[in-house]
Image (cartoon, rainbow, N blue to C red):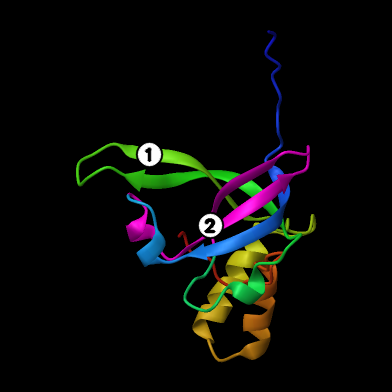
Amino acid sequence: MKNNEFGFSGIGAIYSWTRVERDHAPAGFVDSAPYYVVLVGLDEGPRVTAMLTDLDVSSPVEGRIKIGQKVEMVTKKLQQEGERGMIVYGYKFRPVLEQAPPEFLLGELADLAQRSAANPKDEKLNTMYEAMFKFTTDEKKTSII
């Protein structure tokens, strides 16, 4: 029997998702709970299951995870076996990030960040700063799950 090799882009869309609570997390993943598991339909056709990462979980994310939302595969830490044990890495998915416009200059961002930090109550500056980091999921902040 001949084996066929297939390459995948790692880009797809959320087909389904669920939240895994601490009480229902499998051994080795309890410390990561709560976390989200997605069924992703890859652009090439197959569906795969993985954790969803790079979400701000300090506020409810349920309204920000959408069926059909574009996601991309990333390599992340899955678990660590004991205090001094082996670290296990694997794939997770995150919302696809928007690319900065081609005319965007890094110096402009640094200048805007400094002005925004110096004037945290200046809504116009904060809005401009947040717009430069806008994700396709309209998140304003990310953290690793």
Label 2 belongs to which residue? 53
**Which class describes the residues within 10 Å of circle 2: few (<14), some (14-19), or many (20+)?**
many
What residue is drawn where x is 50% and y is 83%? 118
Label 1 sits on a secondary structure element that is strand
Horizontal and vertical percent position of residue 105? 70, 59
Q: Is residue 49 visible?
A: yes
| Percent of width and height locating residue 134 | 68, 68
Which quadrant would residue 47 be assigned to in this image? top right
Residue stretch rendered in magenta on the structure: 28-54
Closest to the observer, 117 or 80: 80
Residue 50 — which label? none
Label 1: how many Cα within 10 Å (few below 14, some 14–19, many 20+): few
Q: Which residue is mark 1?
A: 88
Distance between mark 1 and mark 2 Cα atoms: 16 Å
Residue at x-position 22% and y-position 45%: 82
Amino acid residing under circle 1: Val
**Residue at the farthest top position:** 1
Is 98 left or right of 92, judged from the image as shown? right
User: Is residue 33 covered in magenta?
Assistant: yes
Q: Residue at x 65, y 76 (%)?
A: 63
Quarter holding the N terminus? top right
Above or below — where is 28 with respect to 114?
A: above
Task: Name which residue type carries label 2.
Answer: Thr
Residue drawn where x is 63% and y is 43% of the image = 48
Point out residue 117 in the picture as x, y percentages from the top left corner.
Answer: 51, 79
Say which label, 1 or 2, has the lower sequence index. Answer: 2
Residue nearest the observer in this picture, 7 or 39: 39
